[in-house]
Amino acid sequence: MRSFCNLRCAFHAGFAAGIALTCVTAAAQPASTGSGQAYPNRPVRIVVPQAPGGGLDISTRAIALRLTETWGQQIIVDNRPGANGIIGIEAVTKAKPDGYTLSAAFTSVLTVNPHVYKSLPYDTFRDLIPITQTVTNTIVLVVNPTVPARSVKELVALGKSRPGDLSFGSFGIGNLTHLAGELLGLETGMKAIHIPYKGETPVVVDLVAGQVAFGFATAPGVAAHLQNRRLRLLATCGERRATAFPDAPTMIESGVPNVIVTGWGGFLAPAGTPSEIVQKVSRDTAQHLKAPELRDRLSAIGAEPAGTTPEQFTAFMKRETEKWLRVSKAAGIYQSQ
């Protein structure tokens, strides 16, 4: 892999999920399904291209609870992990575009996979309609407590003293957590063995078990383990200290200024879904994300609410796609899979 050579990368990773809930109704502006009926008038399925328990899974559960109360309909989560999110996204693109199949997806599957894989069964902008960015997740560098490192500097020194001995886990080949680990090595000269997993939950499980030494993950996905000291936080990966971890230094403060990693996720629908349904889902989601109770709850675990419009989310995703084209080529992973 080539050196980035002064390339300052803002990584965005993230993840997806939902919940199965039934609840009471609340008033909301209706949308037509095309048959004259108000939307939704039956359960809505959210396909999640990862195993449950990850960072976006946690935030989406909180959002889904509020939407269930608003809509008075069950939200069914269909977790379909595998192939760096490809399996789940393909299922959404092949679904009937009636608003009853949605996806909660994230950076890698939407804006990185198109550059890493030579062939994909979907085109992000042809086959999907962006609805809203739901959250921006804090990304953290964590180690198993048995690793004798309490700072990024100590981890790098340990890695250099034991080249090829330390292992780091990622959410999958080509995932942003993979690229973050590789970039850490490129920037510091530390050599570690990459162990790819099928999503966030499996790698976090092995980090806690000590099967891998360190890794990058979403703050919501590891918050409970940090609180219970089953994992040790070395640094957060944004440009400023995270609200959820004010005492933790950033990677910049830790002497590795080019490893800047933030994560985001959002809701999408199959191409052809009626505009009025897309707008309703976006509007209702954004309304709940503005509620102080939900905002505070999400911020406390490192997930900052977004709630953008479909137009804003589309423009944001296009900028992300262009950026990751440049980064994937600089990193030597363009069409490597």
Image (cartoon, rainbow, N blue to C red):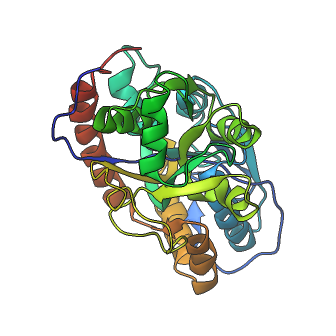
Residue 17 percent location from the top left of the image: 65, 49
Say if residue 149 shows up in the picture.
yes
Residue 236 lies left or right of residue 260; in this view the side is: right
Identify the image quadrant of residue 64. Answer: bottom right
Q: Is residue 212 above or below residue 288?
A: above
Residue 187 position, x and y percent, is 29, 38
Q: Position of residue 62 (x, y in %)?
A: 68, 66
- Quadrant for the C terminus in the image: top left
For the view shown, which residue lies furthest in the bottom direction? 292
Which residue reaches farthest left? 6
193 w.r.t. 169: above or below = above
- Residue at point 64% right, 37% down? 50
Say if residue 271 shows up in the picture: no
Quarter of the rendering occupied by the N terminus: top left
Residue situated in front as seen by the camera: 48 or 72 = 48
**151 relative to 309 in the view: left or right:** right
The residue that appears at 76% across and 61% down in the rendered structure is 228
- Compare residues 283 and 36 and report the one nearer the observer: 283
Task: Please state if 119 lies on the left or on the right of 70 as rendered.
Answer: left
* Picture coordinates of residue 325, whole percent (x, y): 25, 32
Asked if 221 appears above or below 163 in the picture, the reply is below
Q: Residue at x 50, y 69 (%)?
A: 305
Q: How many marks?
A: 0
